[in-house]
Every structure is written in structure tokens, then in C-alpha cells.
Image (tube, helix red, strand yellow):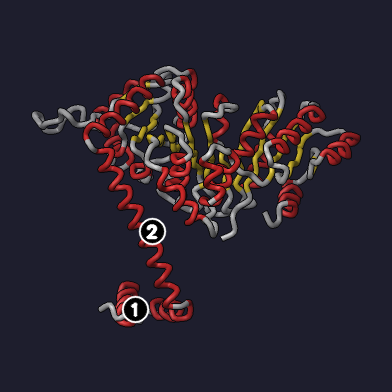
Amino acid sequence: MSKPLRILIAKPGLDGHDRGAKVVSRALRDAGMEVIYLGLRQTPEMIVEAALQEDVDGVGLSILSGAHMTLVPRVLKGLREAGLEHVKVFVGGVIPDEDVPVLREMGVAGIFGPGTSTHTIVEFIRQQLAGS
Amino acid sequence: MELVTRALAGNRYALARLISLIENDGPDAHAALQAVYPHTGRAHIVGITGAPGTGKSTLVNELAKHWRSRQITVGIVAVDPTSPFSGGALLGDRVRMHDLAGDPGVFIRSMATRGSLGGLARATGDVVKVLDAAGFAVVLVETVGAGQAEVDIARAAHTVVLVEAPGLGDEVQALKAGLLEIADVLVVNKADRPGAAQTALALEMAVGRYAANPGERTEGLWQPPILQTVALNGTGVAEVLEAIERHRLYLQTTGLWAERERARVRAELLNVLQQEALRHILTRIGEQHLHRLIERIVARELDPCSAAYSLLSELLHERGLK
């Protein structure tokens, strides 16, 4: 039996809009993945700790506050320090175009702005994590 | 096994990987469990069960905080259901456990049921063993939202806490067989809501606080306490913790601890035997033969029971066991 992909979905930072994170969680669940939903107001340290304990294959971060350029690097650094550099990170939310290449350069595997279909996200994750 | 050594030495990522290996029943899972087993048997395994939305995760969070304030380490296994359609799952129990983040004395792992129906995943018992071997003094096992028949936790835990909430049904519900009978501690959570006293009363009736046979000897027997909590603000949680600790002492002083262990080991052994025997038999019969039999049963030439008996008798003869 092939094991289901395990994906952590979290909202770092202080904005309280979790609808997007929930819609994506549900879509991943319906695509046969095990989603560990961490919820609102998570610090990068909390996200890294949960990713480690749950031994996830990927981490999805939903950020609508504009703080992505601060929060995302801290999550990436924390994952590296915890020995989790193989965990793929993807980001959803309101990310200005000029920030996209910078985030990619840092090591974010995928960035999904408003209007992205859940199908696109599911396919992307499957492709990125094929073989894990 | 190196992974086991590192996990038991306190490497948290090795512990997480070891749990995955066992949960996925990978090629080395058996060897890993073999290496883990001698280190098990020390933890107090506490099951938290009850209907969806009664506050199990919130209570787990509060209980763990209380144990941590006494320097007692806590491992948590939180089980949520796998979709029967997609095979996916949404594991949401950590949402209520944010207070425990950053504490090296706590390890939380979410598990999907992956097709099991008794309120736990197939591998939950083995994951509990890993946390036990890793040295967590208390292992809390939160079941899926359980209704009436999800009683696997009774075998997996030393102490079972059943969480109820006001307004979920009258005393006839409380009289039904199943979950209520396996509870060692009963908690009416959300006790700040209307109806909490009635719920507690219905539970008292149900657990036989008013004995059906007056004069029946009850001294020395464990009476499940019925406690009221508001887990969200911590009210009453200390009393639940005391009751759980009292139950542990009761089990240890009466010898029931060892008795429960024997019952659990027996069930586990029979379960593995059953699985392995079935796998062995299926390999010997072969898919084609099985298919032919199924066709004959569908055509009503044979009934399922007779087919199984004749298969078994063939296999036993073949091996010269009969």
C-alpha cells in the first residue's frame, strides 16, 4: 500500500483569515492526502516543531497579512536547522509579483495567489512530492 | 536498529521517523517494534474518548499542561478519521493544543484511522509503544469522535476518560451498551452550558450509582467518578487529573494493572495471528482458486461458510495436520 502524503497547513503571523487555508486543506483531503491542520497565529517555531513531530512531506503556509517576506524565511531557516530541508514549502495568499522570484530563490517550491484553482495546487503538490 | 537507538536517546526527528515507519508498516517496521518492545511497559496510557465536539482535544491540552507543571512528560497520539472515499484525512486536533508548543517534554502526533473502525488506527497501539519506550511518563490517546461502539481504546489504555457535553441525549442514550461501560472517569465538559447537571445525573443513573440490587457489595470496586469541567478555561481539570492518578493507583494496588496488560497482550497476539493466518491461507489458495470459489458462491452452487470450511480442510490435509 502506498502511504498517503502528509501535508501541514498553517497560518503564520497575525491575520485571522483562515478560509483559504481551510479550502486548500479540504481539497488536499479530497485528493487523498493526510492534512495536519494547525490553524491560526502560528509562529515559525511552532510550524517547524509541528512539521518535525508529524514527519510531513510538505508545509503549506497561508499568509494574507503582507508579512510573508519576514515569516517565510524564518520557517525555511527553521526547517533547515531541524534537518527538514527535504520538506517542500508552498505559500498561498496575497503575494505581490515582485516578491515571487525572491521567495523562489529562498527555496519556496510553489506560490499560489488569489484565484488559483484547488486542482492546480493538488497537481502541483503531487508532482513535487512524487516519490516521497 | 540505529533509528530506534536515536529515537530512544531523545532525538525527536528520529522519533517522528520511527513513528512513520511503524504507521506505514514499512519493511523494517517489525524489526523496529522488536527493538522497541523491551523498553515499553512504563508509561501510564490514558485514553480520551467521546462524541465529536465534546472538547476532547481541549481537555487533552489542559491535562497535559497540568502534568507538565509537575515535571511529568507527556506523549500525545490524536486520531482523526480517514475519508472512506478519498483515503485522505483532515487531522485537526493540534489546533486545540497550541499551548503545548515549544515544550520539549511534550510530543504530539496526529494519526488518521486509515480504514480502522474501532476509534483508533491499526497502528495506534504500536505508536503508543514507541512513545512509552521513548520515556514519556504519560501517553494520552485521543480517539476519533466516538459514538457508541468505538471501544478499542478500552484495550489500548489503562485508564479511559469519557468526555460528554450537555444536550447530546437523554438518559436512554446513557443506558445503551458500549462506550459508557468502558469509562473509568466520566467528564461532563462545557459544564457552563445549560443542562450540565442533568447530563451528570443521567450518567450517574447509567453507571449504576443507584445500585439495581441494594445491598450488593461495591466496596473496593472502582466507581467511575463523574466530574464537570470547562476545559476551555481549565475549570475542573485538576480534579480530572486527580481521578486519573487515583485510577492508576487503584489498578496498581489491586493487581488489575497486570491483569489488563495480560488481556491486552492476548488480544494483540490473537489479532496478529488472525491477520497472518489469513494472509498465509490466501497465498496458499491463490487468486484464481479464490475467484472460482466466489463465482460458485455467487451462482448459489455453494454458500460462503461451506466454501471456507472446505478450503480450510483441504489446507490442513495438505499439510498433514489433520
Residue B162 image point, x, y percent? 36, 33
Q: Which mark is residue A93?
A: none
Task: Confirm whether residue B313 shows in the render.
Answer: yes
| Residue for badge 1 | B315
Which residue is outermost to the right?
A: A98
Residue B215 image point, x, y percent? 8, 29
Task: Confirm whether residue A30 shows in the render.
Answer: no
| Residue for badge 2 | B272
User: Which quadrant, please, contains the N terminus of chain A?
Assistant: bottom right
- Amino acid type of the residue that numbered disc 1 sits on in the rendered structure: Leu
How dense is the environment of label 2, judged by Cα within 10 Å: few (below 14), some, or many (20 and up)? Answer: few
Q: Chain of mark 1?
A: B
Q: Earlier in the sequence, mark 2 or mark 1?
A: 2
Residue appearing at x 32%, y 47% in the figure? B264
Residue B273 image point, x, y percent? 36, 61
Q: Nearer the viewer, residue B22 or B3?
A: B3
* Relative to B264, residue B256 above or below: above
Label 1 sits on a secondary structure element that is: helix
Q: What is the spatial separation of the Cα atoms under label 2 and label 1, in whole angstroms?
A: 20 Å
How dense is the environment of label 1, judged by Cα within 10 Å: few (below 14), some, or many (20 and up)? Answer: some
